[in-house]
Amino acid sequence: MYLRRYERRKNGKNHTYWALVESIRTACGSRQRVVAYLGELKKRERNGWAQFSRHLGKKDRPSPTLFDPPGYPEPDDDVALVRIKGVRLERTRDFGDVWLALGLWRLMGLDELLCRLMPDGREEVPWSVVAAILVIGRFCEPSSELHIEKTWYRRTALEDLLGVAAGQVHTDRLYAGLDQMLGHKEAIEKHLKQRLGDLFDLKYELLLYDITSTYFEGECLGNPMAQRGYSRDNRPDCPQVCIGLVVTTDGIPLGYEVFAGNTNDSTTVQTIVEAMEAKYGQADRVWVMDRGMVSQENLKFIRDRGGSYIVGTPKAMLRRFEQYLTEKNWHEVQAGVEVKLVAGPDGEETFILARSADRARKERAMHARFLDRMEEGLKKMQASAVSGRLKDLGMAHERLGRLRERYWRASGAFDVKIRPIRNPAGKTRVSIAWSRNGRWGDWAHISEGCYLLRTNLTDTDPATLWKRYIQLTEAEWAFRITKDELGIRPIWHQKQDRVLAHILVCFLAYVLWKTLAQWMRASGLGDAPRTLVAEFAKIKSGDVVLPTRTRDGRPGKTVRLRCVTTPDNAQKVLLARLGLTLPQRLRYLEGATQV
């Protein structure tokens, strides 16, 4: 669910309000439905901070050290008179989004942790502050370290919030900060596990594991991990690395590992399981993984360690259960989805057959499209053979192979025969004929919308097993967020350690993202932070310039007050639901009395 801002004009006045919207799947496709309209916050409603405070010392509002800037000096007793005509606003900067991100950073305790891990030395800017700048930049406006130095940092109010001048933020310092952070990855993950567990009361009995890839711009000859492999980004021309991520059922990240770009998915499972057990202990844990992770060795490895699993299976394995697909005794787990349990041959495993009406319609349409395209390609081959352009038998088989590879979903539907013509009468040298394979059509009709899962949890009902497996989409959403919202791709760094540090920064930004999503959910604001972050980015800070005069009318000195713009009514609703209060002034330079 996500937020949508509405603006209406009624009785000559503009009205702005928020609605909570969700995407639903209908027979006519995806549609959007308004869940609730969010108006003014009623006194009886609890804000999101009230939900969090139950786990953090029962505070009534966020601690000043979390979200408020450093205190400013109190005005002295001198009084100045302001020339109203000369009052102006200068040096506006982005405030709301970086203020929120810095608050999340402090809420997670990462400022205190990195201060301990990376103690201050002779450097002007502490390494813990550099790390905060890198992660907040990735959270608010993902881009390069050069963009942070030249554009982004100078445009934000972080100079006031962190006390670091723009001239002290440069690429050399940021790159060195990446190098300093990388050595503390394990300690950071251990700290986050504890902190996230305190905030969200996490359960670790069910872990979701998936793997993705992200590609490089450049050859990366000096990075042995940058290899070409199966690209999830449709960039097989670029070297890449693979990232394995473990999340909870709510999508809260627990840890990750980076592998070479040509690593097979199934070879990463044992590494991930051992890494998670080293951090969280070896317990009776349930692993949920996609079919790319499945191998007999991996499943045996998990069983031998006392673990359990729910995994997908290759589509070809579904054929072994063809007789069960036409039988009854299916159990509906939700509208349009049915499941059935089938005992495994050795008694150690249980197989879960599932079929989805929506998935069946999608696969049926795909099969129809691929059949048409496959047949059209065969007709073109036949026309080329009749005209004499295609006369080599080997070339004809090669062309058929490319056609089957392109339209592989329908390649088994055609029995194609290519023969040479011994005594050609005209230009034709090769005969091409085909017929439909009825067996393929029957199997396609039965299996459309069906898939197979396997597990060693033999005493659990099918609905529970299916729902646990479907939660794997949380890991898939994690990858989508890190790629689309946090800009993990493409990677421009060339050194291996720099690449690993870049991924660590993206991981920490994702932790802040999910923390905000959980906070929003507790506040009744959905769980899609992008709209809220974009709305907060509209809140600015600036210098209110106040020209003064003395009591006898002579010009006095100019007073500058660094203030925060007042949020509009819609932004006030968001702040109230989150339980946050914007600071009104960031820096007080001199007292003034307005006349």
Image (tube, rainbow, N blue to C red):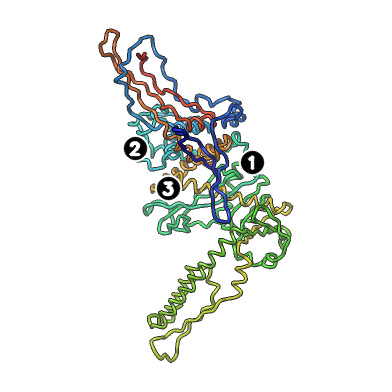
Does residue 320 lie above or below 127 as drawn?
below
Mark 3 belongs to which amino acid?
A: Gln
Query: 525 above or below 545?
Result: below
Q: Amino acid at mark 1?
A: Lys
Label 2 belongs to which residue? 151
Would you place residue 435 above or below residue 540 in this image?
Answer: below
Q: In the picture shown, does residue 384 fall above or below 340?
A: below
**Quick one: SS at disc 3?**
helix
Tell me how far mark 3 sits from mark 2, CA to CA: 27 Å
- Between the C-alphas of marks 1 and 2, the distance is 41 Å
Q: Nearer the viewer, mark 1 or mark 3?
A: 1
Task: Compute the Cα span from label 1 to label 3.
Answer: 34 Å
Q: Is residue 460 visible?
A: yes
Query: Relative to 516, is 548 on the left or the right?
Result: left
Q: Amino acid at mark 2?
A: Thr
Name the secondary structure under disc 1.
loop
Q: Position of residue 453 (x, y in %)?
A: 64, 58
Location of mark 1 (residue): 203
Q: Which residue is mark 3?
A: 496
Q: Residue at x 58, y 35 (%)?
A: 522
